[in-house]
Amino acid sequence: MNNELSGKLPGELGNLTALTKLLVSRNSLEGEIPISVAASPSLSIFNLSENLFSGRVPKALYNNLNLQVVNVGVNRFSGDVTADLEEMSKLPNIWGIQMNANQFTGSLPPSIGNLSSLQYLDLSFNNLDGIIPESIANCSSLQYLVLSSNKLTGSIPRTVGQCSNLEFVNLAQNYLSGDIPAEIGNCTKLRVLHLGGNKFKGKLKVDFSRVTSSNLILGISNNSFIGDINFFESIATNPNFTIVSACLNNLTGTIPTNYDVKRLSKLQVLMLGYNKLEGKVPEWMWELPSLQVLDLSNNKLSGPVTSSSNFTLLNGFIHKNVKTVPYNCHKLDSYCAYGFDFYLNDRKFEVSMSYLTYFKYLDISCNQFSGIIPPSIGKLTNLSYLNLSNNAFTGVIPAAMGRIFNLQSFDVSHNLLTGPIPQEFAGLSQLADLKMGNNSLSGPIPRSIQLQSFSVDSFLPGNDELCNEPLARLCIVSKNDSTTTADPVNFNSDSIENFISVLGFVVGFVALAIAIFVRHYQNHPKKKVVPADSSLTRNYDRYGAFKLPE
């Protein structure tokens, strides 16, 4: 409804007694809602979302028995929402309530259970407290329940399992505790269950086998869940899971070794970082046919990443609802299950869906993996983010990894790697983040505009025998050695004198060339070059994950 409207809503609109729909969302309207407008007797759809309105929502609005939708989300409204919900619970036809991203206080009244026609309820990003009432079970038509980013306490009522039409549940970023009621498995139409950033504990014992959705998303990161094989058994009860995020919990023990891959054949994103898992990563985890995003970082996993791992199976498509992918799993918890964020170099970097068709992410950092880096990892030709840091990998960096041309972030720091940086790395033109320090690499850094653009921090500390820019160490090729290996030498007084004499000639020549170039440039100005990746950045509305139909 964006028409670039500004100013205040005219009270004269209340004179339109036949007005049934008021749709003025996504403008710059401000001030309070005129009571005359709220009291329009024929209103059925009331949508003032994404403006700058403030004050209270007039109670006169709730006297209209024809009212079906109230959408005042993303404004500056305030006050106790409890009374508003109690008044709306008397309306027989209301099916949509969206009051998210305001400054409302209060709690959910038990009378909300009277809304048997309610399908959408979004009160996220407010300051609500109290519990989720058991009477929510009486909202038999409820499909979307979004209460995230509030101050709710208590547990999820077991009666929620009686909401048989529930599809989307987001209770993330509250103070909810207890366990996840097994009864939620009775919600057979469930598509998204996001409970991250709470105080849930215990073991996940939900049987999802009765859920019939073709794509199922589970987010339980940043809680206090415990257990090992029980977690995987609960997930494996339904083959339609596409995204599972369980970072920052207390999952312990070993990952089951014997597992039927077909039970997780649709799984695309698996986030298990920041837990207490130990032992080896079983072969089946590398063979999941749809897996694209795997985070096992910051556990106690050990052993080799075997060369027989068929990394080519880590291919497929990101689910249509995943707009961005998390660089660090603990960033996930503040957002909706399909509103992930990707963080690169501590800057939020959001990319549109069209650029994520073959996005790949692999993070097994901060474990105890040993042995060589398997060359077969080079088969992940569409990999964008690869983090193998803080392990005990030995041997050389496989040359095949230099053929992952889409690689943007590569971290192998804090390992026991030796040998040269493969010449093939000169072709990684997309590389934006590189960390190789704290190894024993040697020889020349391959020459390329990309590699020479990194700071010395990308290669240091350690790697005392690396040379070439950007390091302040020259490479001298041995005359008695027909190979391409090189020995680094530090600048001493003799080499500096020789270098300065050569530099004087070079500077004089370059100065002459610059003078000629400047005169040519003034006569023939060059067009500005726009970086190819600039089109990737796109901002997504933080509150836009769920919108009422208009």
Image (cartoon, rainbow, N blue to C red):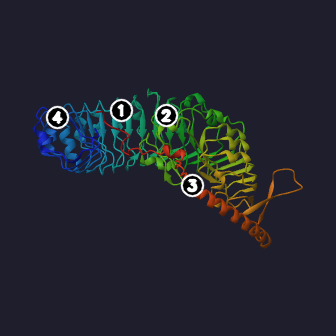
Task: Return the disc, 4 or 1, that comes first in the chain's sequence.
Answer: 4
Q: CA distance from mark 4 to mark 1?
A: 27 Å
Quadrant of the frame with the C terminus? top left
Give the number of the mark in front: 3 or 4. 3
Quick one: SS at disc 2?
loop
Query: What's the amino acid at mark 3?
Result: Tyr
Q: CA distance from mark 4 to mark 2?
A: 38 Å
Q: CA distance from mark 2 to mark 1?
A: 20 Å
Residue 478 relative to residue 257: left or right:
right
Q: CA distance from mark 1 to mark 3?
A: 65 Å
Residue 303 point in image, percent of width and height: 69, 46
Task: Return the disc, 1 or 3, that comes first in the chain's sequence.
Answer: 1
Residue 545 point in image, percent of width and height: 38, 40
Location of residue 147 with respect to 144 vertically, above or below: below
User: Which residue is located at x 42 percent, y 38 percent?
Assistant: 193
Dots 1, 3 in contact, CB < 8 A: no
Query: What's the amino acid at mark 1?
Result: Leu
Which image quarter: residue 385?
top right
Task: Write down the residue under mark 3.
Answer: 521
Quick one: SS at disc 3?
helix
Query: Within 10 Å of the Cα at label 3, are there few (<14), some (14-19), or many (20+) other Cα atoms?
Result: few
Task: Write down the residue under mark 4.
Answer: 43
Residue 69 relative to residue 64: left or right:
right
Task: Write down the residue under mark 1.
Answer: 166
Quick one: SS at disc 4?
loop
Task: Return the disc, 4 or 2, that comes first in the chain's sequence.
Answer: 4
Dots 4, 1 in contact, CB < 8 A: no
Give the number of the mark in front: 2 or 3. 3
Dots 4, 2 in contact, CB < 8 A: no
Quick one: SS at disc 1?
loop
Residue 521 relative to residue 466: left or right:
left
